[in-house]
Image: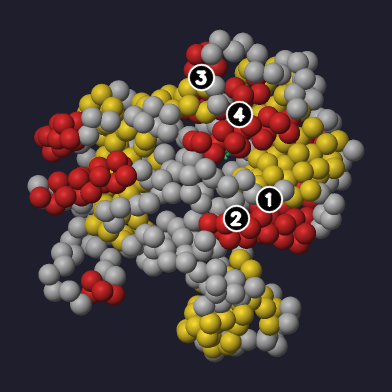
Amino acid sequence: MEKTSYPVKKNAVYPLEITSLAFGGKGVARIDDYVIFVKQALPGDIVNARIVKRKSSYAEAIIDSFSKKSDQRVDAPCEHFDYCGGCTWQNLEYNNQLSHKTQIVKDAIRHISGLENCEIRPIIASSRPFHYRNKMEFSFADRKWLTPDELGDPDISKDFALGLHVPGTFDKILHIEKCLLQTPECNEILAFISRYARENDIKPYGIKSHQGFLRFLVIRQSYFTKEIMVNIVTAYEDDNILKPLALKLKEKFPQITSIVNNINTRKAQIAQGEKEILLSGKDCIVDKIGPFEFNISANSFFQTNTKQAEVLYDTAMDFADLQTDDMVWDLYSGTGTISLYLAQKAKFVTGFEIAESSVQNAFQNAEKYNLENVNFIAGDVIDNMQHLKENVDVIVTDPPRSGMHEKVVDAIIKSKAQKVVYVSCNPTTMARDLKLLSSNYTIDIIQPVDMFPHTYHIECVTRLSHK
Ligand SMILES: C[S@@+](CC[C@H](N)C(=O)[O-])C[C@H]1O[C@@H](n2cnc3c(N)ncnc32)[C@H](O)[C@@H]1O
């Protein structure tokens, strides 16, 4: 039955003190035990907040006015911060971001898993708090979303944007020429392509009209080699437009070693095409994690913070503490990056991955390093784990944000593996899965790793040992 008495009313304004941050980026306030998530609020803020959504166990609110601003607030260095969906916490000093992220993991473990005794270590900071992303995806639009300042400017052009989404929208693109998460060279390329498209009247694609040519611009830069790949995603094929642009890009930016054109003729707004045309240079760039070099093509998955991926994988290796006769499963193995690491020490590693193209890349990567003690099984991890009859000593699992299916958790328990290393990009689903695994495993240590400064995303590595 629906609860009838709530401590707050929809649309009413309440004075609230923000005490912590939630996964997802919102500030948390409480009236008695009732939780209110306040958009764009930081711990230490005292605000008057308007309730925009009310549920039985929580409400959501937006800031109406400030009574006091938090001491933890700093000026966000990015000029687009107020309206861009790329970063949530640039206005929170980096060390404070780190301690709040550690606290979010602790809260998830306490509230969702109910685990009291596991060690949760302080998060490992990213060596680069800015310019750390090796890949950024920008969208073109035929209608520019205008900031309040731009709304009153009669000279502003409204029919072209290249940038990032306004938070929570699929069709509103904020035009940007500089993103502090990518390198300065990549920003120069972004600004150049934006200017070139406008000067040459190349039409951006309309998300609603489905007319126009330019859909996405994806820029990747290898941390290790500094090579740059430019991927222009268009609605149809037209070399007459793109070849001159590719020539200009090569002339102006010698670091660009690959220019490709992905063609997406479908309505779905994705930066992957049904067809790829190589406009200039090679069809991939090379980056390196630990001792391994990887070929990365336009549509391959690759960790976006290369340097910090090494920290993540080193932590996973350390927790796995492999012996030379260990049989290992790497669940959700992607392009086999973790499997290669594990194969350096283990007797044999089996990777499980649903995406056929990633499995192909994984085999190529293993072949490049003459690693004969790895195999990859394509398909749903649930089906394949149950059929594999071999013994397993150590399981490494790195599921997507939704975490592991209950059947996968069951199969891990049935496998009787002595050690499990759980790599997670979502503390909430990780906490849920750890609770289930805790029937047979002791949760020893959780090590959060900051892969994505200024955003609310948190990566964790957990070591579990069989009871
Ligand atoms: C977080 S990524 C991990 C990739 C890899 N471990 C790495 O570090 O690069 C999760 C991977 O799980 C794969 N995946 C998602 N659902 C799956 C399923 N049901 N069975 C097998 N693989 C799945 C995705 O294709 C993706 O490659």
Disc 1 to disc 4, how far (Cα)? Answer: 23 Å
Residue behind mark 4: 338
Above-or-below relation of 5 to 127: below
Dot label at residue 403: none
Pinpoint residue 134: horizontal percent, then vertical percent.
41, 39
In the image as oriented, which residue stretches furthest toward the right?
467
Disc 2 to disc 1, how far (Cα)? Answer: 8 Å
Frontmost residue, 99 versus 375? 99
Above-or-below relation of 32 to 372: below
For the residue carrying disc 3, how many other residues have a C-alpha within 10 Å: few (<14), some (14-19), or many (20+)? many
Above-or-below relation of 323 to 67: above
Find out if the beta carbon at label 4 lies less than 8 Å from the nearest ligand 1 atom: yes
Residue behind mark 3: 365
Q: Amino acid at mark 1?
A: Pro
Q: Quadrant of the C terminus?
A: top right
Q: Is residue 321 visible?
A: yes
Pinpoint residue 330: horizontal percent, then vertical percent.
66, 29
Pinpoint residue 87: horizontal percent, then vertical percent.
45, 58
- Colour style of the rendered protein structure: secondary structure
Above-or-below relation of 433 to 417: below
Residue behind mark 1: 122
Mark 1 lies on a secondary structure that is: loop
Disc 2 to disc 3, how far (Cα)? Answer: 34 Å
Mark 4 lies on a secondary structure that is: helix
Residue behind mark 2: 98
Disc 3 to disc 4, how far (Cα)? Answer: 11 Å
Question: Closer to the observer: label 1 or label 4?
Answer: 1
